[in-house]
């Protein structure tokens, strides 16, 4: 019986090890399925809606509308690029409010030539200043879309498309597939087109409702892992009660490596700075950052500034280290448990984010229009700052163990790299000290004596 017991125990140990390894591998493989999920904006997405408003002899006319339902992530210049693959041999006869970037091979058409004959067209928004006869509502913003909270009126983009060589009824139309969205680079993953209830439209006199012939939706979600290989921002910390300034983690957004990769960063006093900024990477928006230990384009500094009897004060500074990027209508999302008692904010706009009922610990901050909503490129003017005044909650407030510092910070929708918690500025008397009681040696000697007498 005894050998069998040991055999069973050995088998169980092997099974347990195998189970742990299997769970670990599954967790690694299943991680990618949730990488587009944002805990602070769980329902955020860009929805692309196609409304077929009329049929034509060989196809249909549709209005395509993009809604940016993301609370704090916007699309900045040079704007969105939308692509798809036709299900059959459709062509684009004409467009209003947008254009295809390539016409493709339309040689088989005589006389009236389509706007685009490509199987996989790529479409971009028209620029501001487009003639009125080429515009429709919510078009012609250069592909720029604001976040839903900052500016919902400008979080929508539309264009009209006339499709030929397509179905002419609800049953014969084939939905486009393989949708792609660049905003302006990678980062978005789009699902398949799904037929939904036709959209209803209210006439201008608000006395009559009309309805689309057919409607389908495409939903695109953002993943920071797909958008860039390295983070784009980092966080540094300081406080009035400790002289230590906790810098951004070293190599948070990459490492300085001008020896093997010349031009990866530039010193602010470099005499060739102007030529480097206007170099070949300018057209592709490739970041050109100032040489730092963290190599991040953006640094957010959180300074615990003052302590009052019933309040405490924080200063937030955002610094741009990117010489090739001006951030228009930037925003910051900060998670801290004391945001439920935010009393006053200076020179920033504020909106509470409550993705979960009963939890008010997240705030969205952005600049005041025409004052500091424009974050200039790296240099003397490349920073914005504000101060926040919090009321203390006696049941939770403390300066101990880094409680006064944020749990998470996003800049323009991207999660910033935080310093490790054990490096946070601590209270002067909060450093761990080994306390040795005078009774400890006595009790140790007494225990040893008892042990010896027991076995004597």
Image (cartoon, helix red, strand yellow):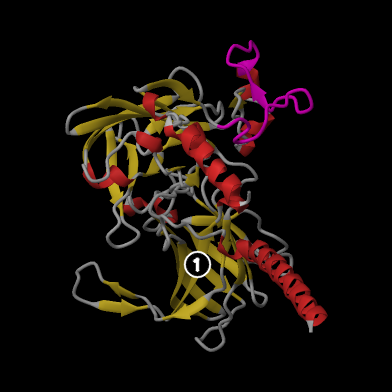
Residue 406 point in image, percent of width and height: 39, 40
Q: Residue at x 55, y 29 (%)?
A: 322
Q: Does 51 appear above or below 239?
A: below
Q: Does 175 appear above or below 64?
A: below
Please tell me which residue lies in front, 154 or 414: 414
Q: Does 241 appear above or below 199?
A: above
Please tell me which residue lies in front, 66 or 51: 66
Residue lying farthest to the bottom in this orientation: 171
Report how many numbered discs are placed on residues in the image: 1
Residue that badge 1 annotates:
219
User: Which image quarter: residue 214?
Assistant: bottom left
Residue 295 point in image, percent of width and height: 60, 29
Q: Residue at x 57, y 83 (%)?
A: 167
In this picture, residue 324 sits left or right of residue 260:
left
User: Which image quarter: residue 59?
Assistant: bottom right
Residue lying farthest to the front in this orientation: 456
Crowding near the residue tagged with mark 1, few <14, some 14–19, many ≥20 C-alpha atoms within 10 Å? some
Please tell me which residue lies in front, 420 or 178: 420
Q: Residue at x 38, y 54 (%)?
A: 71
Residue 138 point in image, percent of width and height: 38, 55
Residues rendered magenta in the picture? 249-273
The answer to whether any part of residue 234 appears in the image is: no
Q: Is residue 238 magenta?
A: no
Residue 63 point in image, percent of width and height: 44, 67
């Amino acid at each position: 019986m005894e050998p069998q017991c040991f055999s069973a125990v050995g088998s169980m140990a092997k099974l347990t090890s195998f189970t742990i390894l299997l769970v670990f591998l599954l967790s690694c493989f299943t991680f990618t399925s949730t990488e587009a999920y944002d805990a602070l904006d769980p329902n955020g997405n860009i929805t692309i809606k196609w409304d077929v408003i009329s049929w034509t002899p060989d196809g249909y006319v549709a209005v395509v509308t993009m809604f940016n339902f993301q609370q704090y992530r916007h699309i900045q210049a040079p704007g969105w690029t939308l692509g798809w693959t036709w299900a059959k041999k459709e062509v684009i006869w004409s467009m209003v409010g947008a254009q295809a970037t390539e016409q493709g091979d339309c040689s088989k058409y005589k006389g009236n030539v389509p706007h685009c004959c490509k199987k996989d067209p790529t479409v971009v928004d028209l620029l501001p200043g487009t003639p009125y006869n080429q515009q429709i509502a919510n078009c012609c913003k250069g592909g720029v879309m604001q976040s839903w909270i900052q500016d919902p009126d400008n979080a929508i983009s539309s264009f009209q498309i006339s499709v030929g060589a397509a179905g002419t009824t609800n049953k014969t139309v084939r939905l486009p597939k393989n949708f792609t969205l660049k905003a302006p680079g990678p980062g978005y993953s789009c699902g398949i087109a799904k037929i939904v209830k036709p959209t209803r439209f209210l006439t201008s006199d608000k006395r009559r409702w009309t309805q689309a012939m057919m409607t389908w939706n495409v939903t695109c979600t953002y993943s920071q892992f797909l958008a860039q290989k390295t983070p784009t921002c980092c966080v540094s910390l300081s406080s009035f009660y400790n002289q230590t300034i906790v810098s951004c983690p070293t190599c948070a957004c990459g490492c300085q490596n001008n020896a093997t990769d010349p031009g990866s960063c530039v010193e602010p006093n470099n005499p060739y700075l102007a030529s480097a900024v206007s170099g070949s990477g300018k057209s592709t928006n490739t970041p050109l950052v100032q040489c730092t230990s963290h190599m991040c384009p953006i640094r957010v500094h959180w300074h615990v500034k003052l302590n009052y009897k019933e309040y405490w004060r924080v200063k937030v500074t955002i610094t741009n280290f990117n010489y090739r990027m001006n951030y228009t209508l930037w925003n910051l999302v900060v998670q801290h448990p004391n945001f439920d008692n935010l009393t006053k904010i200076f020179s920033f706009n504020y909106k509470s984010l409550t993705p979960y009922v009963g939890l008010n610990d997240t705030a969205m901050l952005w600049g005041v229009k025409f004052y500091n909503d424009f974050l200039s490129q790296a240099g003397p003017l490349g920073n914005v700052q504000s101060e926040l005044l919090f009321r203390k909650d006696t049941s939770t407030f403390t300066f101990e163990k880094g409680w006064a510092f944020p749990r998470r910070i996003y800049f323009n929708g991207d999660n910033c790299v935080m310093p490790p918690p054990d490096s946070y500025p601590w209270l002067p008397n909060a450093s761990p000290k080994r306390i040795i009681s005078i009774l400890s040696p006595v009790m140790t000697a007494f225990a040893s004596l008892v042990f010896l007498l027991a076995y004597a």
